[in-house]
Image (tube, grey):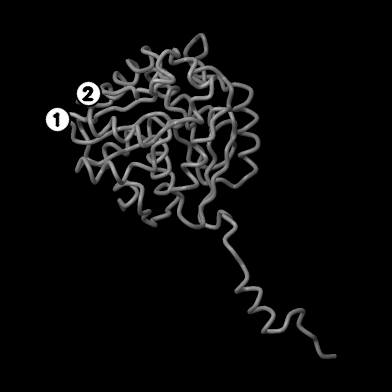
């Protein structure tokens, strides 16, 4: 008996021509732990991710740092929503998992990164690469040849977190040439830093103003710019800043994406989002 193909050659060709990109992670899948009420991290990662790379988020509502030290300092405990996220991520065949929260990294203290990676790995139960945003940023600064960064931080960072961030970079061998906490603008200046996000500033961020402030304030002694905060909308201006300042720019989400791509063996360069994503 003759077997009749389900589709003729012409129909199969029509189906092939009609197929569109569905953002399926054919090359790599990355999982992000992000702040529960933020939209910026996913948006920026999707904007920069090369074809065949998919992004998946688990939302965290814990206080900073997200993982807390045990009383005997033998390790850290994961909050309930991170434990739940690890269980879900563990079934998703991910290549990398990122604790995508700058604040946790800079206030966590010595050994926090290693202890957190170990705890996530134990809960995840897979061979995925595990990292934290602070660690990715340090790797990106070094890869970019930056030693004296101009550190730019979100307007919602309180004084204590700003100080912790500057100390964090110094502890890792950098000497910031200066720092800027973004001015949120006249409509928001009277609002305390800790109230900006609850009152909706996260969805009112102005990248044009951020660009102008960085360009005006970047000191000539800085050999690059570091923009911290995964919820800080900024990747749209990376390329423009690099052209205007003549110096490399590293941002929180860009740094973590770059590191995850390299760890997953995805060597595709990404244009339009700074020199870091064009490094081999």
In which quadrant will I find the N terminus?
A: bottom right
126 displayed left or right of 175: right
Image location of residue 13, percent across then percent down: 63, 79
Residue that sits furthest to the front in the current view: 186
Disc 2 + disc 1, Cβ < 8 Å: yes
**Residue pointed to by mark 1:** 221
Identified at 76% across, 83% down, the residue is 5
Does residue 119 lie above or below 278 as drawn?
above
Q: Secondary structure at mark 2?
A: strand
37 displayed left or right of 131: right
Image location of residue 220, percent across then percent down: 14, 32
Using the image as rendered, state which of residue 198 and residue 127 is in the foreground.
Answer: 198
Residue that sits furthest to the right in the current view: 1
Residue that sits furthest to the left in the current view: 221
Residue that sits furthest to the bottom in the current view: 1
Query: Which tag, 2 or 1, sits closer to the chain's start?
Result: 2
Does residue 43 lie above or below 266 as drawn?
above
Image location of residue 91, percent across then percent down: 65, 43
Q: Secondary structure at mark 1?
A: loop
48 displayed left or right of 180: right
**Residue pointed to by mark 2:** 178
Which quadrant holds residue 78?
top right
């Amino acid at each position: 008996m003759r077997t009749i193909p389900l589709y003729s050659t012409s129909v199969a060709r029509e189906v092939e021509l009609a197929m569109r990109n569905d953002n399926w992670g054919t090359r790599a899948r990355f999982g992000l732990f992000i702040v529960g009420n933020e939209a910026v991290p996913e948006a920026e990662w999707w904007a920069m991710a090369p074809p065949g790379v998919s992004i998946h988020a688990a939302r965290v509502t814990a206080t900073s740092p997200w993982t807390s030290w045990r009383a005997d300092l033998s390790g850290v405990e994961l909050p309930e929503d991170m434990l739940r996220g690890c269980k879900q991520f563990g079934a998703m065949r991910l290549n990398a998992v990122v604790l995508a929260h700058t604040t946790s990294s800079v206030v966590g203290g010595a050994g926090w990164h290693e202890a957190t990676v170990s705890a996530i790995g134990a809960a995840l139960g897979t061979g995925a690469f595990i990292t934290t945003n602070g660690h990715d940023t340090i790797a990106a600064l070094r890869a970019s040849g930056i030693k004296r960064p101009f550190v730019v931080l979100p307007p919602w960072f309180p004084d204590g977190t700003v100080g912790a961030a500057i100390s964090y970079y110094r502890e890792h061998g950098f000497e910031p040439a200066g720092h800027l906490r973004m001015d949120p603008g006249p409509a928001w200046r009277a609002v305390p830093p800790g109230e900006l996000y609850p009152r909706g500033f996260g969805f009112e961020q102005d990248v044009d103003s951020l660009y102008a402030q960085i360009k005006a304030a970047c000191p000539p002694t800085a050999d690059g710019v570091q923009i911290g905060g995964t919820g800080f909308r900024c990747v749209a201006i990376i390329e423009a800043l690099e052209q205007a300042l003549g110096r490399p720019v590293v941002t929180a989400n860009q740094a973590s994406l770059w590191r995850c791509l390299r760890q997953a063996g995805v060597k595709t360069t990404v244009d339009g989002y700074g020199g870091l994503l064009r490094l081999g």
